[in-house]
Image (cartoon, helix red, strand yellow):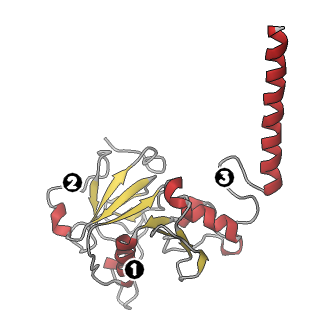
Amino acid sequence: MKKLLILILLVNLSACTDITKETQTQVGINNNGEPEGPHTSTEWRIWAYSTAAPSFIASGCKVMEADGTVLREGANGWTAMPGNPRGMSDPENGWKDPHEAMPMVTDAQGMKWAMAYMAGTKPELDHDGWMYMLHGDMGEDNSVGMRMSVNSEGEIDIKTKETAAEGQWIESGPHIMLMPKDPSSLKGLTTDFNTGGPYIMFEGTGYDHVMIPLEGYYDYQSQKK
């Protein structure tokens, strides 16, 4: 009798698993939560941008495009948006994956910092700000920053691996960023991104901030020890 009950329980559990898989297929969601279908869809973009933060923040954050188009209103004071200044490699089909989009999920102070950075103006924060980038980024010159270099025609020079200062290029995996109200408060913290610990990016530029590596940080660029 005991063996029969165990067999019945196993059959029921298997049936429940099959129903769950069937339901996920019907609503068009993969096991990792990614919506099926084109990456140009609103559903996919909301998923890709918001999941740059933990689920308990992602579920209630505002989601928007870089041009300010709101994809979903939020209620927790956090905002998700793509941060890749180079744009899509295949605009017709949207971002290749969340990593290419370089999405960031930021609080109000972090958003002030981001807007100032993109405008080339000095960040004016009320207090320190925070930003999640759990999908990482496509690479930065750790010493300069794209808004700190202008070519002879007055155009912003977006740094690439080829134009970055020697030994300063870093393509990051998951990380958290701290944007200080007072950049000078970071004095003494290393700028070495190979230690595995927190480090300063863009030191001395006015856009100084702390990069806090998380598990998988060196998935795109090997750590140099």
Quickly name the residue at label 1. 115
Amino acid type assigned to the residue bearing label 2 in the image: Thr
- Badges 1 and 3: C-beta atoms under 8 Å apart? no
Marks 1/3: CA–CA distance: 29 Å
Q: Nearer the viewer, mark 1 or mark 2?
A: 1
Q: Is residue 193 left or right of residue 77?
A: left
Q: Earlier in the sequence, mark 1 or mark 2?
A: 1
Quickly name the residue at label 3. 33
Marks 2/3: CA–CA distance: 37 Å
Amino acid type assigned to the residue bearing label 3 in the image: Gly
Mark 2, other Cα within 10 Å: few <14 / some 14–19 / many ≥20: some
**Near-viewer residue (102 or 79):** 79
Residue 17: % across, % down: 78, 36
Q: Secondary structure at mark 2?
A: loop
Amino acid type assigned to the residue bearing label 1 in the image: Met
How many circles with numbers are drawn on the protein?
3
Q: Quadrant of residue 94?
A: bottom right
Q: Residue at x 52, y 78 (%)?
A: 66
Marks 1/2: CA–CA distance: 26 Å
